[in-house]
Image (cartoon, helix red, strand yellow):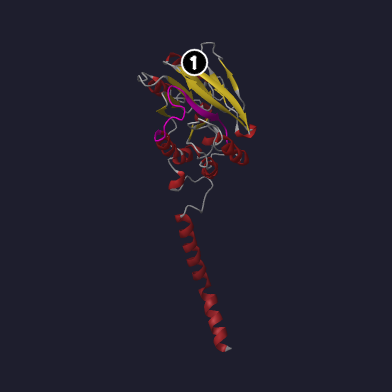
Amino acid sequence: MTYFFSLFHRLLRLRPALLAGSAFTLASLLSGCGLIEFNPNETRTPEAYSNLTRKNLERLQQQPNPLGGDSLRFVFVGDSQRFYDEADAFVKSVNQQPGVAFVAIAGDISDFGLIREMRWVHDRLKKLDVPYLTVIGNHDQVGNGRESYQKVYGPLNYSFEYGGTRFVLVDTNGREYGFNGRVPDVPWVQRALSEPGPGIRRQVVMSHVPPMDADFDPQLERPYVQALNDAPRVAFELNGHRHDFSIGEPYENGLTFINSYSFEKREYVVLTVWGEKEFSLKTVQY
């Protein structure tokens, strides 16, 4: 009995060290797997959840255009935010659409700019049969969101070419920069849309905040619209932010603006483009 109490006393004395060692080992294992989070605003992310724009573009370039020839079809939607059940249903619906090359999401992937939200959305969208591409929204810039978006997805402004189309994706969230006169980056937009090569039949611009919205930098509204209007073969601009579908020519200059449904509406648009500015669209409920 004396031996038993002596052993028990030793274990009690060693308990702090044992607990500390166990905690250190557990933390090391979890952090190595990217499972532990010390701060909700941190921007660390595992490789599987990083550089998703580059990875999706590589995947897109490796696949032939499903429609072939001059036509291209893609799905357009916006504002996934916290609508995770809707994202699951969205994926199932899109995977049944014929001839779709990719999905374009017009920003607000997250609600609070948290890296965990972007990862939760990706866990659902990675089940799409086609790549998906995003542009940054105003909610994606809350807190450390801008850095998180760059870690998970990539550049705030970028362009790519596919199916005879140049796509230009641009950060237009002027309010999040204090309307500093630099967002959107109009000179960058002008360069991105200049001199499309002979294989490029048309150009499409996508951003989150439309230029006629109060969250767009008012001093840049006219220069931005003029840049799009002056660029050759711009078929239309795609926007999110307003959580509902609309289509029109608000500036009466022949430039079409199309606004997306949000995930919560359980609807999306399938766009088919051909020629220089020809397109058709249908809305799909799910």
Q: Quadrant of residue 150?
A: top left
Q: Quadrant of the N terminus?
A: bottom right
Q: Where residue 12 sits: x, y (%)?
A: 55, 76
Region in magenta: 61-80
Amino acid type shown at disc 1: Arg
Q: Where residue 42 sits: x, y (%)?
A: 49, 46
Secondary structure under the numbered disc 1 in the rendered image: helix
Question: Image height check: is 44 above or below 8?
Answer: above
Q: Where residue 43 sits: x, y (%)?
A: 47, 44
Task: Depth check: give the residue in front, 190 or 60.
Answer: 60
Residue, x 45% and y 32% (percent of image)? Answer: 156
| 111 lies left or right of 171 | right
Question: Image height check: is 81 above or below 37?
Answer: above
Residue, x 48% and y 18% (percent of image)? Answer: 235
| 112 lies left or right of 72 | right
Q: Quadrant of the C terminus?
A: top right
Q: Quadrant of residue 168?
A: top left
Question: Image height check: is 110 above or below 229?
Answer: below
Q: Is residue 204 visible?
A: yes
Within 10 angstroms of label 1, few (less than 14), some, or many (20 or more) residues? few
Task: Depth check: give the residue in front, 68 or 242.
Answer: 68
Q: Dot 1 corresponds to which residue?
A: 222
